[in-house]
Amino acid sequence: MALALLPAVFAASFAMAQAGADRAGADKRRSGYQDMGVALQKMQDDDTANPGMLFVQLGQQLWAKPAGANNKACADCHSLADMKGVAARYPAMSKDGDKPIDLEGRIRLCRTVNQQAEPLATESRELLSLAAFVANQSRGLPITPPADPRLAPFREQGAAIYERRQGQLNLSCAICHDDNAGKKLAGVTIPEAHPTGYPLYRLEWQALGSLKRRLRNCLIGIRAEAYPYDAVEYVALEIYLMDRARGMVFESPGVRP
Amino acid sequence: MTQVLINAPKTARKGEVIELKALILHVMETGFRPGTNGRIIPRNIIERFTASWNGAEILRMDLSPAIAANPFVSFFAVATESGKITFRWTGDEGFVVEESVAIDVA
Amino acid sequence: MPGTEEGTTTRRTFIAGAALVSVLPLAPARATPEAMAAAIKEVVGDNAIREGRVTLDLPPLIENGNAVPLTVSVDSPMSEADHIKAIHVFNEKNPQPHVFDARLGPRNGKAVVATRIKLGDSQKIVAIAETSKGEFFSASADVIVTLAACLEDLT
C-alpha cells in the first residue's frame, strides 16, 4: 500500500543545493548526477519517477515494524529527526568495537544486538530499503565525515587501496576516477567516484544497491578479485571516498546508468 | 509487500487536465534472459495496467517484456467529479495489485 | 613446472575470451525490421499511415538500455468527436516488436503517455496513433544505446 507519509517534495533539490555550493567557492568536484543526461537527472529528481523511492517507502514500513526477541521496531528507539544527517557522516567507528562500520553495517548490528532479530543479509532488499530510508533523511545535506582520530588509519588504508594498481587490467581506482574522469568509457562518462547517492538505483542493476556493491563491480570490472563481503577494505575505501566528497550534497536515493 | 507510488493532485477544478503518475515494484523479467545456471529465467511481467475514475476506465495499457523493471507510467485525465482514481496492475504468476487515491473536484 | 606455466597461459587466454563474450548482448530471438512491419500491419491493416501529429520523445544518447524514458504525445483535441483512441509503440531489434499498446479517449484530455522501456541495442522506435476517425499517424526515432562500461558477475 502506498503511504502518504513520504517526503513528497525534494525540498532541497539537488540543483538548488548545488547552486548554493557553487556560490560558496570554486568547487570543481562533480557528482555523478552532473555527468548524466537530462532524462536521468529528471528521473532522480521526481519522487514518483525515481525507482529508489519504492525502496525508501519499503524502508519506512520496515522502520516501524517490530522484529526480534525484544519485539522492538527501529522507530521505538530512534526518532526520525535523529536520523537526519546520519547517512551523510557514515562510516563511523562502531560504539564498542575497534572497527569502523558503514550505514548498512550499523543497521545490521542494531538488528542482531538491539532487536535480537535474525541478521539481515548483505545486499538484501530489507537491508537496502532500511538503509535507503535512513539515507533519505539526509538528502540535500552536505557530506560531513566525523573528526574521529580512530578513523584515520582506515582512511589511509582506503586511500592506499584507491591508488594501488590491481587486477588483470592493472588499473587503480585513481587511474579512472582521477586521471580520466570526465572522459568516455563505452559511451558513459567516467564519474569522479563521489559516493553522493548511495544506496542508489542503478539502471544496470535494475535495482537498488549499496556502495559496496558498486565497489565490487569496479573490482570485477578491472578483473581483480573482489574482497569478501565483510572485508574491512570496503569500509576503508568508503571512509576515504566520503572524505574525498566532504561538503558535497548527499542525494540518496540517486539514480545512475 | 508490493510497493506502489502514485502522484495525483488531491484537488482539481472541474474540467482541468491533470497529470497522473504511477510507479510499481516489479522485476519485469523478460523470459529471454538466461540465469546463472544457463537456463532461461521464466517470463514474469505485468501485462496490463488500467486506470479508472469512479469505476469508469480512463486508460488501459498492454505491456510487453520491453517495459523496464519497476514500471513507470504517466498520463493525463480530465477532472470530472470527486471520488477515487483506481490504478490496477495485472500480470504473470497471478500478479494483481490495486491502489486508489481520492480526489476532490470543485 | 613447464606444465603449470602452460596451463596458466591457457587459463588466461580463456578468461580474456570469456570477458569479451560477456559483453555481447545475449539474443536468443530477435525482432527484425520485417517483424516490426508485420506487427504494425496487424494494428493498421490496409490503412495508410501518415507522418505527423505524433511526437516521440527519447533521449538522443541512451546511457543504459535497461530503462529508457519515452514519451509519446499526439496533437488532438481529445473531444468525443475527434480524439486519439490508441497509441502503439514498436521496436525493431528487441526480442519482440511490441513495446506497449495504450487505449485512451476523451477522458484523458491530452493524448500523452510516458513510460520507460528496455532497448537491447541501437535501433528504430516507431509510435503509431489511431484516431477516432480511423486514421493512423506515426513518428519514429533512431536511438543509440551504449553498453554499460563495467559489468558485474552474477554470483
Image: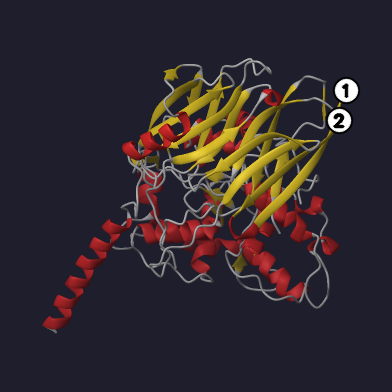
Q: Which element is circle 2 on?
A: loop
**Amino acid at dot 1:** Ala
Q: Which element is circle 1 on?
A: loop
Looking at the rendered structure, whether the residues under marks 1 and 2 are on a common chain is answered as yes
Q: Is C113 placed left or right of A47 in the picture?
A: left
Checking the image for residue A32, the label placed there is none
Q: Is residue A2 above or below residue A104?
A: above
- Which chain's residue wears label 1? B
Q: Which residue is mark 2?
A: B82
- Residue A92 visible somewhere in the drawing: no
Q: Position of residue A182 (x, y in %)?
A: 39, 38
Q: Is residue C143 above or below residue B25?
A: above
Q: Residue furthest front?
A: C46
Front-most of B47 and C82? Answer: C82
Q: Determine the residue positioned at 65% across, 26% down.
A: C105
Q: CA distance from mark 1 to mark 2?
A: 8 Å
Q: Is residue A257 above or below residue A232?
A: above
- Residue B3 visible somewhere in the drawing: yes
Q: Residue furthest bottom?
A: C1
Are dots 1 and 2 in contact, CB under 8 Å?
yes
Q: Is A102 placed left or right of A212 in the picture?
A: right
Q: Which residue is mark 1?
A: B106
Front-most of A89 and A74? Answer: A74
- Which chain's residue wears label 2? B
Within the image, what quadrant is residue B48 found in? Answer: top right
Q: Position of residue A164 (x, y in %)?
A: 36, 60
Front-most of A257 and A251? Answer: A257
**Amino acid at dot 2:** Ser
Within the image, what quadrant is residue C87 found in? Answer: top right
Neighbourhood count class around disc 1 (C-alpha, 10 Å): few under 14, some 14–19, many 20 upward: few
Q: Determine the residue positioned at 46% across, 16% down.
A: C52
